[in-house]
Image: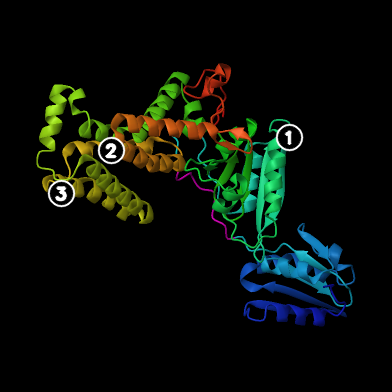
Amino acid sequence: MKVHADAERNGEWFREQLTSSSDLVLKKLTIEDYHYLMVYLEPMVDTDTINENVIKPLQENPSKPYTSVISMLDNKPTDTLEDALDAVVNGKSVIQKDGESYCLLLGTELNNDRAVNIPVNERVIRGAKQAFIESFETNIYMIRKYASSSKLAVTYHDLGGHSVTRVAIAYMKGICKQEVVEELTKRITAAEGIDATVTLGYIKGIVTGRSFSFMPPIMITERPDRVKAYLMEGKAVLIVEGSADALIVPISFWSFFQSPDDYNMNWIVGSAIRCIRLLAFLVTLALPGLYVAFTTFIPFMLPTEFALTLQSSQRYISMPPVMEVLFMMFVLEIVREAAIRLASPIAQTIGVVGGIVLGSAVVQSNIVSNTSIIVVALTGLATFVIPVYEMSASIRLYSVVVIFAAQLLGIVGMTLSILLFVIHICRMNTLGVPYFEATFPFLDQMKDTFFRTPGRKAGAGKK
C-alpha cells in the first residue's frame, strides 16, 4: 500500500495495524507552518537520538527540505506503508511531512546489547579472549575486524515469515570454492519466506538437509579468531541474528579435535595435546564396550592379577556388567545436565555431591563395582577433553551402541560397531565436501590432522 499524502490517514493505518500495542507512539510535530508525523514503538527507540538528530535540526532549519536536515546516516526513504511498518516493528522511527507521499525510515533503535565478553564454552590458555554476542551487527563487525581483507564477502538474507531473521554468509572470494558458496546460497535462499522460528538448529537443517547422522556435520563456534582461521582456509561462515554463535561449513572430522591453543604454543607440545584428544576420543568410544566384552565373554584373556581383582570387585554385585556401565553412564549424564542448567555456585555443589557422595554410596551399597565406576569416570573425563561439545555429545551417544554390540557379540560385536562407525563417517559429506577429507592416501594434506606440523600459522585448524 502506497504512502498517502495525508499524514493523518497514514497514522490511522498504523493504529489499525498495531491496534493492540499500547506502546505505539504517533507523534504530531508542528514547526512553523509545517506538519510532521512520527511513528515508533516507545520501548525500542532511543528518544535522545530522536531529539538531537531529528527534532532539533527541524526546529533550527524549518524551511529546508527535511530529508537534508535530519542528521542521521541511517535514513532511507520509502513510498510503501508495509516497509514503514516493518521498520517500526524492528525498532526504527518513521517520519512523514504532511502533503508528501513518501516517508523516511530512521535508525533510532535503542542499543541494549551486552558487551563483548570472553568465551565461555571454548576457553583457551593463550589467544584471543573475545566471543560473539547476540547482536548481529557486532558479530559482523568482529568478523570483518579479525579477517580484514578486501576479499571478504558478506551477503545478507532474510528468513522467516511473520518474524524476519537476518542471516549472513561470509566467505573469502578466491579461497572458498565457488560451488560451495553457490550451493549454500541456494539452500538459504530456498528457505526465504517460510514461516519458521529461525535458530541455529533450523539453519543446520537447511544446510545439511534431512540427515539422520548422529555426527555433527557443521561446527558451531563462539570464537571470532577460529572463524577467521577457517575463512582463510576456504570455509564459509553463517551468522544468525540473535545468536551468539557462528556456523562453519563445510567441515571435516579432524577439525573437531583442533583448538586455537595448538597454534599458540610449541608445535611439539601442540601435537602431543592433539594426540591426547584423539586418544580421549577412542577411550570415550571403546572403553565401556571393552569392559563389557572382557568381563562378559573373555575374562580369561586378561592378566591373572587384574582378572582376580575384577572378580573380587564383582563378587557381591547383583547387576551384570552391562547394566552397571549403563546405570553409571545414566547417572553421569544426569549430573552433567544438572551442572549445566543450574547456576554456577549450585552447579559446583551438584558436581561434588554427584561425584563423591553418590559414587561412594552406590559402591558401599553393592549396586555397582569399583571397576565399573573407574571405567565410567575415565570415559566421562575423556569426553571433556574433546574441544567441541557437539562432537563430545555424539561420541557419548554412539558409545551406548558399542556397549550393546559388545554385550551381544563380545569383541566381535564391538569391532563391527566401530567398523560401521568408520564407514558411516567416510560416507558423510557437507555441501559435497567429504567429512573424512585430508585422510589417507592424501599424505601431503595430513600435516594438520593427527599432529600439527611446524610453520603453520595460528588458527583453528587446516581442515
Element class at badge 2 = helix
State the quadrant of the N terminus: bottom right
Which kind of residue does numbered mark 1 sit on?
Lys
Mark 1 or 2: in front is 2
Q: Quadrant of the C terminus?
A: top right
Left or right of 124? Residue 139 is right
Query: Is the residue under label 3 in contact with that under label 2 (CB below 8 Å)?
Result: no
Q: At which x and y percent is residue 131?
A: 53, 44
Q: Say above or below: 111 vs 60.
A: above
- Residue 161, by quadrant, is bottom right
Tell me where the magenta segment starts and ends, as one range.
112-121
Q: Could you tell which of marks 1 and 3 lies nearer the N-terminus?
A: 1
**Residue at disc 3, secondary structure:** helix
Q: Quadrant of residue 231?
A: top right
Q: CA distance from mark 2 to mark 3?
A: 26 Å
Predominant secondary structure in magenta?
Answer: loop
Q: From the image, tell me which residue sits under label 3.
A: 361
For the residue marked with disc 3, what is the amino acid? Ala
Which element carries disc 1, helix, strand or loop?
loop
Q: How is the image coloured?
A: rainbow
Percent position (x, y) of residue 139? Answer: 61, 48
Percent from the top left, x then y, of residue 4?
Answer: 86, 77
Say few, some or many: other residues with alpha carbon within 10 Å of mark 2 (under 14 / 14 to 19 / 20 or more): many
Dot 1 or dot 2, earlier in sequence: 1
Comparing 72 with 245, the one in front is 245
Q: Measuring 38% from the left and 31% from the top, which residue is drawn there?
A: 416
Compared across the picture, whether 271 is left or right of 455 comes to: left
Q: Label 1 to label 3, Cα distance in Å? A: 60 Å
Q: Which residue is mark 2?
A: 407
The circle on residue 151 is 1
